[in-house]
Image (tube, rainbow, N blue to C red):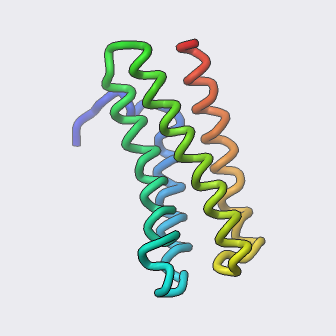
Amino acid sequence: MLQLAHKKLEVCPIARELVKKIYLVTADFPKAEQYLIVTQLPWAAVCICSNLAEGSSRISKIEKKRFYEIARASLVGIDTQIEIAVDLGYIKPEQVLTFESKLESDFRMLSKMIQKFS
């Protein structure tokens, strides 16, 4: 594996942990959701990691900021999709606790990263 800048970001391991948790929880979702929320949740989580990697590889501060904003937007999407999954009974409210701290810390870290470029 390449030793690139994004791997040194404090937020990256937390974002990757979020990906694992989402894959684990969506494995138990109904088959009827296979092409809907089961696809969207992991996709959004992977997009966070991808946008962090792409953003950190950019030279332009404006481009870096934009990729970090996209990563944060994916995080907000995950939060909403988890709420919907709870509403539909696919995730138990107590399971949400495993996501909350990761979502909150990722959001805070991404917001700080974005503020650096404002």
> Furthest residue to the left?
1
Compared with residue 37, is residue 88 higher up or lower down, i.e. above or below? Answer: below
Q: Is residue 86 left or right of residue 52?
A: right
Q: Please report the residue visible at 23 percent of the width from the left and 37 percent of the height from the top.
A: 2
Q: Please report the residue visible at 52 percent of the width from the left and 74 percent of the height from the top.
A: 26
**For this rendering, which residue is in front, 107 or 80?**
80
Compared with residue 21, is residue 18 higher up or lower down, i.e. above or below? Answer: above
Q: Please report the residue visible at 58 percent of the width from the left and 55 percent of the height from the top.
A: 78
Rendering coords of residue 94 (x, y %)? 76, 72
Q: Please report the residue visible at 32 percent of the width from the left and 15 percent of the height from the top.
A: 59
Residue 95: which quarter of the image?
Answer: bottom right
Q: Is residue 96 left or right of residue 3?
A: right
Q: Is residue 5 left or right of residue 31?
A: left
Quarter of the image for the C terminus: give it: top right
Quarter of the image for the N terminus: give it: top left
> Furthest residue to the bottom?
31
